[in-house]
Amino acid sequence: MFGALLAGFIVAAFCLILLWHDPLLFWNDDYELSILPVFADVVRSWSEGAWPLLSPYSWVCGNLAGEFQYGTFSVFVNAAVVLIWKFPLTFPQQAAALSIAHLFVLAMGGYLLARGRKLAPSLAVLVALVAALNGWIICWGATDWFGALGAFAWLPWAWWGMERALDPGRGRFRFLWPAPFVYLVVTGGFPYTVLMLGLVAVWLGIRSLSQTRELVSVLPLLVGGLLGFGLAAPAWLALLDYVYGSARAAWDAAEHFQWRVPFTALPGFVIPNWTVNWVDFSSRLMPHTASELACGVVPPVAVAAGLIIHRRSLVRRIRWDLGLLMIALILSMLPTANVFRWSFRWLPLLHLVLALSAAESLQLLGQSRLRFARSWLPAIITFAALLATYLWIPPNCGVPKYNLAQELAKPAPLDPQRLYLSVYPAPEVFYRLEKKPEPFGETVRLGSTSMWGGIHFINGYSPIGPSGVAREFAFAIHGELRPDIGNALLEHESGADGMLSRLGVDGVIIANEVATNPQPDTEWELAVTTKEGRIFHRRGEPFPAVRSLTAIESRPNEQFAAAEISRIVNRRNWIEAGVLVPGGDRPALLAISRPFFAGYQAKVGSRPLRVDSYRGLFPVVEIPAGTSGRLTMIYRPPWLVWGGGVSILCLGVVAAGGVLALRSRFTSGMRRS
């Protein structure tokens, strides 16, 4: 553990050097518009005493559990976020602290994985450096797609645990080793890493079967993996439920050909500034520097040197690693399918396997004619090469960077009691740092940045795009509306009987780049004008969270009674209101101004009520005539109930197994003494 901690501190020192060079290193694109504002809301949720399943501050990104990338069910992610937010840090500093904490963990795991294979401490540090500081992790995972880092940070740990589970010398409770780390990988928030975990598990199982010829040899690995997945059941069940019918499941097939590693880019493993054409986000072949392939030069050279000098002896020693290496390389070049896209996301696993193969090669070389191969020199060269790479080649990879104002943490100049629709052009074109260098964002609130100030927005940043408002209005990934849809909503659906009114929208923000105003003028008043745009409020008081509708477009032949609604309590995962429905033959229909997700349950007193939706946009509840009492609607989907039950059961098994293992070890120690 001392060596693992040392590796973690070396990686942390590396990152601090990069931060000294560029204080905004970890502050890019998704981190700005999605990751950090959501985590601010996660901290707010815990301070309110609620699990951060839902967010009331975005309709498009309202289901944090279903989005998966926010690690809602990861104990480590939540603990790290809550702890970091205790310190008075700026946005870029919070992002840096969160990424460095996970890079620290990743480096420790890489070190332990290497030491578990009896590699020298110096070579284990080499593996840790490549695992945590390779080009893909630094240029994408740590600085943009945090979910990738949050999950991959635990993959070496899970691998280490699975290898211990396959070691018969570790006793009958060895199946416990993988379980907690498999749980942390799955809940970390990146489906691709779950695929990597599955590939490694299958590879380890096949290797064990080939060596022992006994099916029982893989049983501890299988049981430990299943326990880990069981612990993480709420996370993957939420994702499966959320993705179904989403925009992600219906993306254009052309997107599955983007960001594949071209064969011509492979020299980038040795020459990080190697530039060839890649298919980028626009599906066009564009020149791209292969910084994602940076691994510190030493690993590919060490493997090549070992194969040249020792040939068959090295192949016999690392043939399984070489096979896994080739599989990961091929997968990074192939098109993807369905909810998975951008196959270059396999590169972190490729780097890890390459580092292990290189360390094995160096260990073999050091046992023969090249003593320096087992020294600290390879690790030092790797550290220096990676540092020079990121100082020489900006690790941003061309994704947008925004100069978001720190004032976004405050609600002003917006009204926290209102629900806003923000109409703005594509951020990656109009608001990136090159176009707008001055701090901005307090008015338009791009992506999910409304969560910082606790402002209720329709807009949000969602990579998945759940069925409902995200698909109905065709929101783009950065939370903007298409110009034609935005103009149609403002000109034709902003009146008292329009779509925005039915949603409960009583505030509209128009960026200066958009000329259209909400119509009719009699319904709206200009509340504030800022250097970013215009803020309009619907005349009168803000809409309540629960409203009684006497008619609704989706049920044109029905009329409903007007219910009396009082004492509304609107919380993150539930809502309450007093209701009084007049007697007669007409029920009341209540519209709940929050995004609809399957899994809401409603009742008045002890009487259950059905929760429907208006076109999948917001919940509606029909209440029988003559009903009076307290309406309660709570978000309790089946995946949460069943997944939570499975998770608790698996936790009990792991805890009981751990107690028995410690008892067995204590008893054995007493006998020996």
Image (cartoon, grey):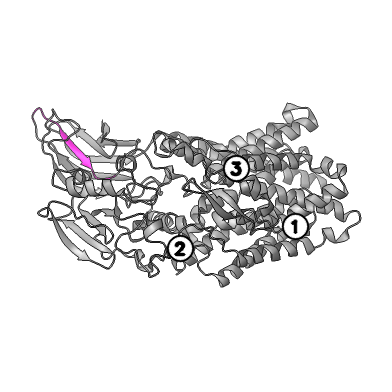
Q: Is residue 646 toward the left or the right of residue 437 in the image?
A: right
Q: Secondary structure at mark 2?
A: loop
In whole angstroms, how far apart are the C-alphas of marks 2 and 3? 27 Å
Mark 1 neighbour class, 10 Å CA radius: few under 14, some 14 to 19, many 20 or more: many
- Please state which of residues 45 and 663 is positioned toward the viewer in this rendering: 45
Write down the residue under mark 1.
Answer: 298
Write down the residue under mark 3.
Answer: 182
What's under tag 1, amino acid-wise?
A: Val
Q: Secondary structure at mark 3?
A: helix
Say if 508 sits above or below 633 in the image. below
Q: Secondary structure at mark 1?
A: helix
Q: Residue at x 76, y 51 (%)?
A: 358
Q: Which residue range is magenta in the image?
A: 584-594
- Please state which of residues 346 and 658 is positioned toward the viewer in this rendering: 346
CB-based contact (under 8 Å), mark 2 and mark 1? no
Q: Residue at x 71, y 56 (%)?
A: 270
Q: Is residue 131 magenta?
A: no
The image quadrant of residue 14 is bottom right
x, y percent for residue 512 = 27, 62
